[in-house]
């Protein structure tokens, strides 16, 4: 568990490094963790706009199976994506799911997940490409993995997930 504890700390900034208004390299390695069907996953923190508890979702007629419906977020209509369905997992009921609201190409989408964890800095040295044993649907919708203290964190590719 010590590895996980260390990964929560951000690296110290060098006092000699020039300050920039651009996104720092450190920020690229910060993820919001979530759980899907018992699997720990991560989404880059820079695309996450909000985290919500269970929401009232309105079904959209003739929408693809992966589209759970839409929800109202402060007066804005947001498309809800059922990640269980998108990743080929069984889900009997998504009404108690949490929502991770992400922004993609100027639009907001709600990704329905089992649980939202914490925001973690994940050491880039622990990054690996998707293992060949990862199920094909997961490989197509993820960028790679981090191995942490016996846990595998699958980093989800938001753009690929939303290409329905």
Image: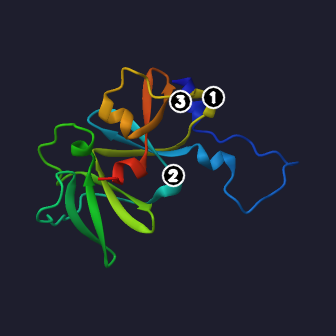
Label 3 CA crowd tier, 10 Å (few <14, some 14–19, many 20+): some
List x then y, in percent, for residue 21: 73, 63
Q: Earlier in the sequence, mark 1 or mark 2?
A: 2
Badge 2 marks a residue whose secondary structure is helix
Q: Write the residue at 50% across / 28% down.
A: 129
List x then y, in percent, for residue 32: 46, 47
Label 2 CA crowd tier, 10 Å (few <14, some 14–19, many 20+): some
Task: State whether residue 65 is above or below residue 22.
Answer: above
Asked if the residues shown at circle 1 and circle 2 are in contact, with their CB atoms under 8 angstroms apart, the answer is: no
Task: Give me the C-alpha separation between circle 2 and circle 3.
Answer: 18 Å
For discs 2 and 3, the disc positioned in front in the rendered view:
2
Q: Write the residue at 18% across / 55% down.
A: 64
Q: Which residue is mark 3?
A: 4
Q: Earlier in the sequence, mark 2 or mark 3?
A: 3
Q: Write the residue at 20% across / 52% down.
A: 96
Left or right of residue 25, residue 126 in this image = left
Q: Which residue is mark 1?
A: 125
List x then y, in percent, for residue 93: 13, 48
Q: Which residue is mark 2?
A: 45
Task: State whether residue 158 is above or below residue 41.
Answer: below
Q: Image quadrant of residue 8?
A: top right
Left or right of residue 67, residue 61 in this image = left
Task: Give me the C-alpha separation between circle 3 and circle 1.
Answer: 13 Å
Q: Earlier in the sequence, mark 3 or mark 1?
A: 3
Badge 3 marks a residue whose secondary structure is helix
Badge 1 marks a residue whose secondary structure is helix
Q: Image quadrant of residue 3?
A: top right
Q: Image quadrant of residue 29?
A: top right
């Amino acid at each position: 568990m010590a590895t996980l504890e260390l990964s929560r700390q951000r690296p110290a900034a060098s006092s000699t490094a020039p300050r920039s208004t651009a996104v720092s390299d450190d920020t690229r390695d910060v993820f919001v963790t979530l759980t899907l069907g018992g699997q720990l996953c991560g989404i880059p923190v820079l695309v996450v706009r909000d985290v919500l508890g269970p929401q009232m979702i309105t079904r959209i007629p003739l929408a693809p199976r992966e589209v759970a419906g839409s929800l109202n977020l402060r007066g804005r209509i947001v498309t809800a994506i059922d990640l269980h369905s998108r990743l080929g997992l069984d889900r009997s009921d998504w009404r108690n799911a949490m929502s991770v609201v992400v922004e993609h190409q100027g639009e907001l989408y709600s990704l329905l997940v089992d649980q939202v964890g914490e925001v973690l800095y994940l050491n880039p040295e622990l990054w690996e490409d998707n293992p060949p044993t990862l199920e094909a649907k997961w490989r197509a919708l993820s960028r790679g993995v981090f191995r942490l203290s016996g846990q595998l964190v699958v980093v989800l590719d938001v753009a690929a997930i939303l290409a329905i």
